[in-house]
Amino acid sequence: MDAYDSYIGKPVTELPTPALVLSKPTIERNIKQLLQDVERLGIAFRPHVKTLKSLEVTRMMLGNGQHRRIVASTLPEIEGAIPLAKEGVLDECLYSMPIYPTVLPRLLKFSKSLKILLMIDNEQHIDVLEKFSGSTAPWPVFIKIDVGTRRAGILNSSSALPNLVKRVEESSAVELYGFYCHAGHSYACRTEESAVAVLKDEVEGVVSASKLLGTGRKVVVSVGSTPTAHVVRELREVLPEGLELELHAGMSAPAQFLRLETSTESSKGNYPCNDLQQVSTGLVPHTAQSVRVLAEVCSVYPERNEALINAGTIALTKETSEFPGYGRVTERPQWAVLRTSQEHGILGLSPAPALSLLGVNEVKDEKAVDSFKVGDKVLLYCQHACITAAAYPTYYVVDEQDVVREAWVPWKGW
């Protein structure tokens, strides 16, 4: 931390490269907007902590105790959040992976400080939990419903679902907390209408599953997609009695949208950040991106109109979007990272219709030799902030003038 803190008060261009740079004012704006939307809707809220894995951001996402539930994908994320439970601002955490035997001892240890919820989608999970001898109290569980993503979860149409619900109800090792779904395929949404359709599919999926229970049961139905606020209100009003609607949050967007968990699993918790994948939907302004990568120009190649930077696959990602390439120069969005190897990135001109979403109306015929010099430092927007952020041992946090004000150390590992 002494090394990291030595950059506090310096402009971002003095950081070592590659470096992950966070705009704190942008993060605060994104989080404030979503918290206001959730409060206006009067619904339960469970942010995901898997993107900017840190106490600082998690505390902000919870509204410093206004909301008291989180979702985590790794054990270090849960362990890292325990100080917030000791502060009295966090009550429970859902481990979002369907459980497996070797994870249970550590989850049991964490449960002494924080209520731990489990995810199941298979009767074999009940077998595992019944055989685990460490726990005396039943584990609270979400049953995950597959509403079209085809990743984790059980289909409503599956004959295995009633059997799974029956096993949960009969087992002394578990107690049903609720039903959970994630419409990862909603990332393809480009309009309000398509986003609303996905949300309705999600709610119908978990509500349909809940009908397998007897009447009068109190359970949570947890969804996350790209709903508009008025549709969330409508859906909440028609929920059967006893069901609590919870939104597990992913994204942030313009004021007319309540952006909740679009894209893949790793987009959960992305809403403080945003990235090129989210901007490419047209629902998120490019100014809402709080994550950038600082890289350095290592060479320039006039004959092929390209430049070499020291940020490759590990520093960025191998994912793309409607913006071709693996990153975009923030001040010259027509220049993209066209190719990567492990530590190398190649900058080149990259026309794309979606560049208008980054404020570029035409791609000029610029020359790399005129645009970049060896030693220049460039800031890049990334395609998928969740994957990019996971690569860095520290986050350099800057103000509106891109001066480093803090250094945050994230939770690492699985």
Image (cartoon, helix red, strand yellow):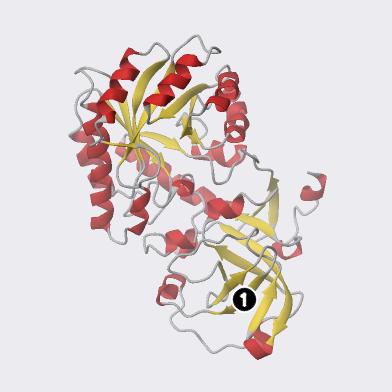
Compared with 191, 224 (above or below) is above
Image coordinates for residue 379, horizontal then vertical, percent: 63, 67
- Determine the residue positioned at 41% across, 21% down: 126
Q: Position of residue 271 (x, y in %)?
A: 46, 49
Q: Is residue 359 left or right of residue 312?
A: left
Which residue is depicted at the point 25% across and 56% down?
194
Q: Is residue 401 visible?
A: no
Q: Is residue 294 visible?
A: yes
Picture coordinates of residue 362, whole percent (x, y): 45, 84
Residue depicted at 47% across the width and 64% down the height:
286
Total numbered badges shown on the rendered structure: 1
Name the residue rendered at 56%, 19% in the picture: 108
Amino acid bearing label 1: Leu
Quick one: label 1, few (<14), some, or many (20+) residues within 10 Å?
many
The residue beneath circle 1 is: 347
Using the image, determine if residue 336 lies above or below residue 342: below
- Classify residue 46 by image quadrant: top left
Q: Nearer the viewer, residue 122 or 225?
A: 122
Residue 369 shown left or right of residue 359 in the figure: right
The quarter holding residue 210 reads top left
- Residue 157 image position (x, y, % from top left): 22, 37
Quarter of the rendering occupied by the C terminus:
top right
Q: Is residue 351 above or below residue 339?
A: below
Q: Nearer the viewer, residue 107 or 45?
A: 107
Position of residue 245 relative to residue 23, above or below, is above
The N terminus, quarter of image: top right
Q: Quadrant of residue 11?
A: bottom right
Element at label 1: strand
Q: Is residue 390 left or right of residue 218?
A: right
Front-most of residues 170 and 270:
170
